[in-house]
Each structure stands twice: as C-alpha cells, then as structure tokens.
C-alpha cells in the first residue's frame, strides 16, 4: 500500500519568496497598472471622455519609466487630475518604487525587513545594505529640496508669462526635468507637441532645466561624494571621478559635434550664442531627459545618429536617468585601452576593476544593442517607416529618453506595445528582468564548473 507523504507546509511559502529583482519588477508593474487604470477614467482627460486602454497604459508606462514618449499632448489632452496622476508616477519611477515604499513605511512607523532593505538598496544602485533607511531618507529630502528650488526658479519666469498657471508649470517641469522624464505642459501655450521649443532662446529656462537634468542623471551615490568633497574636503572615489569625467566629456563633446553638424542646418537662423545654447541643450536632453528645444525632425542625419548614440549611453547608475549607463560604457572603454596596451588587469585611477564588472558591462551593453537593433528592424518593417526613424523611436524608448521624430502617435498598436516593453526593460533593467525569471536555473548552473577552453578572438 502506497503511503502519500504529507505536504511540506513550508514549501508553499518557500515558493512565494521573491528576490530583489522580482520585487522591483512586480513593484513597477503594480504602479503602471494602477496609474493606467486611473488615467482611463473620464476625469483624467481634458474632454471628460475616457482615452481608452491603449493610450492610458502607454502613458502610464512612459510616466513610470520616466521616458516621455506620448501618444497625446500632455498639456492639452489631460485634465489637472490626469496631470497629477502622471506626476506621481513620474516621481515614483524617478526615485524608484522601493524608495517610495521605504518612505511610506517610515511615515506609518512600520519596521522594514532585511529583504526589503536589500531591495531598496538595489533599486538605488547601491550594493551595500548599511543604513538603507537613513540613505533613502537623505535621498528623499535632497530630492525634495532640489525639485523645490528648481520649481521656484522656474516660477520666476513662468508666473509673469502665464499667471497662476505658472506655479503648476514650475512644479511639474521641475519634477519632470529632475526625474529625466521630459513630459511638458506647454501645449496650450505654444501648440501641442511643442515641448520646450518656446524657450529655445531663453538662457534662464534652459540653464535651470539642464541643471535639474544633470543633477538627476549623475546618480545619488555621486551626489554625496561631491557634497563631501565640498564640505569635508573628502577625496572623490575612482567611481565618482569616472562618472563626472564621462558625463562632462559627453555633454561638451556632444554639444561641439551637434554645433558643427547643425550650425547651418537646424540652427541656420540662430545667432552664434543661440546656436551654442541650442547645441548644449540638445546634448544634455538626449542623455535621457527628452525635452525638445528644437524639432528633432529638422536635425541633420549626423546629429540624429549622434543623438541615438547619446540616448543609448544615458546617465549614471543609481540615478533617475536611463540608458546602458555612462559608467558601463566607461568600463568598456577602459577595458579596451587596457587590453590594447597589453595590461593584465583593467584599472582606473590606481584601482582595479573586477573582471565580473567588465563582464557585466559587456552583457548589459550587448543585451541593449541586440534589443534595440532587433526592435528597430521590427518597427521599420511593421509600420513601413525609415530605419533611422524606427531606430530613433526604439532607442528613445529603451533608454527612457522620450525624444521623437514625431512618429510615436501614428505608430500601430503592435508597435506601441513593443515600445512599452522597451520602456519597461529600459527602466527596470533588461538583465534584471531576465535574472528575475531565471534565478533558480542560474543558481543550479553556478554549481557546475567546466575546464577552460582555448579559442582565438580578433
């Protein structure tokens, strides 16, 4: 007589345990579903009619993933309620789902488990779990302070121009810029889809927006190192110096190239100072911010190609920006230099970069390249648009930028779904999603080792 073994009471619980990557994925999906449902309400639309699921959930994904791609103009199509819902999703997506969850737990005086602290640290790009709650509190307060200052500075310009609406404009665009989202409300003022083109010659607004974009995109960890450098004269780490140097090189190098490519093209009617300002802003905004001071369809082909490269790189890890991250690209460039000069180790600033870090940088970059190239071909074939336009839209989505060649609103439902997937993977991290789905398998594989193989490269 066969005897059935009693079910393991702990088996069910064990099966429900989630690692940090899985919690992040589920958290972002929850925010998207909830926000998209709110945007489907008639009260969220300016005309009082429901926008339908495709528009609502595309907008929710774009907001939560701080991308900025839109199928309808934010300022003219959404009500104040809808804009508030969008802004909450932008703030949640910019700081990270777990950052907001930690602050909520603090407000209701709920103790956090070690697992929750690990997830919070992972969502911010920190490897250490030391004092996670204190770290999140500092980030939350610093973010509020920076966004508050940015809002006040923008109000100085917007209130005299737009009256009481300028207060809301200042708050919305400060948060949108800091979170590198790129959503704007200027449709009623300068026309739907105009973005910040109405301020293309305004140095004040341009500089404030660029400062917010760069501050949000440099990474929370680098913030505090810069603060310690100024206040305590503490030396910057090799990582912080790498990020700052790479960021500066891309901003000014990108601006110089855009100036050369478009000084007699998109900027043909501008004065020299206006050309310089427009070039710098374009270089900054392509690094995942998504505001457009000039119509990107007017850019020369070299500038469009350069913009795709800058969008692909993005900002720094642990920031509000997207892309494969500039520190990832920096690691690859340093590895190439080390190998080409015959060095046995990859080093920067008298510090060795672990082989695991180099391999991860290679994996992240190749995953993103494969994803965007494949998606670009699919979109080009599906919607019968030029490959340059398809690549621009796909890289913009995957790098959570939001710049467009005015193709997104007219694309098919299938392509909109593909862009939503790219935005989600770009914000949460493509490898994070893959890792969360293959965690058990990877643990089994890592228990097995094989002999080295020899094979030529190059």
Image: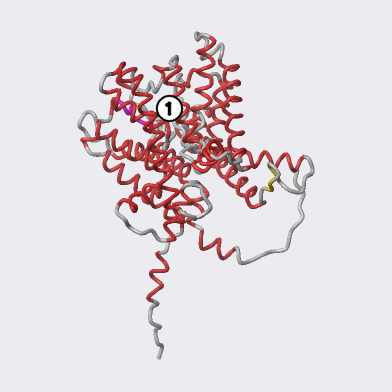
Magenta portion: prevailing SS class:
loop
Q: Where the N terminus falls, by quadrant?
A: bottom left
Position in image of residue 252 (x %, y %): 59, 24
Q: Is residue 18 visible?
A: yes
Per the image, is 183 magenta?
no
Position in image of residue 122 (x %, y %): 48, 51
Q: Which residues are magenta?
A: 70-75
Residue in the foreground of this view, choosing between 189 and 47: 189
Residue marked by disc 1: 407
Q: Quadrant of residue 174?
A: top left
Tag 1's secondary structure?
loop
426 sits to left or right of 156: right
Q: Quadrant of residue 57?
A: top left
Residue in the foreground of this view, choosing between 429 and 301: 429
In the image, what residue occupies the spot 34% across and 52% down? 106
Q: Is residue 380 visible?
A: no
Position in image of residue 240 (x %, y %): 58, 40
Q: Where the C terminus falls, by quadrant?
A: top right
């Amino acid at each position: 007589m066969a005897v059935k073994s009693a079910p393991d009471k702990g088996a069910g619980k064990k099966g429900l345990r989630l690692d940090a990557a899985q919690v992040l994925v589920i958290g972002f999906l929850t925010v998207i579903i909830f926000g998209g449902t709110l945007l489907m309400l008639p009260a969220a639309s300016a005309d009082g009619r429901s926008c339908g699921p495709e528009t609502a959930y595309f907008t929710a994904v774009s907001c939560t993933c701080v991308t900025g791609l839109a199928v309808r103009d934010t300022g003219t199509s959404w009500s104040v309620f809808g804009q508030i819902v969008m802004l909450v999703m932008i703030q949640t997506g910019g700081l990270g789902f777990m950052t907001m969850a930690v602050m909520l737990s603090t407000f209701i005086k709920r103790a956090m488990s070690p697992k929750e602290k690990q997830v919070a640290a992972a969502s911010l790009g920190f490897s250490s779990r030391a004092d996670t709650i204190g770290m999140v509190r500092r980030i939350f307060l610093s973010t509020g302070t920076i966004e508050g200052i940015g809002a006040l500075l923008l109000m100085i310009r917007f209130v005299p121009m737009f009256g009481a609406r300028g207060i809301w404009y200042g708050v919305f665009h400060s948060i949108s810029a800091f979170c590198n989202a790129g959503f704007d409300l200027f449709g009623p003022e300068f026309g739907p889809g105009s973005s910040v083109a109405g301020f293309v010659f305004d140095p004040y607004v341009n500089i404030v927006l660029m400062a917010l974009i760069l501050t949000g995109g440099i990474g929370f960890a680098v913030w505090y190192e810069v603060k310690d450098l100024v206040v305590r004269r503490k030396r910057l780490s090799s990582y912080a110096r790498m990020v700052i140097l790479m960021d500066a090189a891309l901003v000014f190098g990108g601006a110089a190239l855009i100036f050369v490519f478009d000084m007699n093209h998109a900027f043909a009617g501008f004065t020299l100072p206006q050309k310089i300002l427009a070039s710098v802003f374009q270089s900054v905004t392509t690094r995942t911010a998504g505001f457009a001071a000039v119509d990107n369809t007017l850019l020369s082909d070299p500038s469009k190609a350069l913009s795709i490269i800058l969008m692909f790189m993005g900002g720094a890890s642990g920031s509000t920006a997207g892309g494969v991250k500039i520190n990832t690209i920096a690691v690859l460039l340093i590895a190439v230099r080390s190998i080409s000069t015959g060095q046995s180790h990859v080093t920067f600033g008298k510090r060795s970069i672990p082989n695991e870090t180099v391999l991860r940088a290679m994996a992240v970059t190749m995953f993103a390249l494969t994803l965007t190239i494949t998606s670009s071909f699919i979109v080009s074939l599906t919607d019968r648009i030029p490959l340059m336009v398809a690549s621009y839209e796909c890289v913009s989505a995957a790098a959570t930028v939001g710049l467009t060649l005015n193709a997104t609103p007219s694309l098919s439902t299938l392509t909109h779904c593909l862009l939503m997937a790219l935005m989600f993977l770009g914000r949460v991290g493509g490898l994070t999603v893959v890792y969360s789905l293959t965690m058990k398998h990877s643990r089994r594989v890592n228990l097995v080792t094989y002999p080295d193989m020899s094979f030529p490269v190059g």
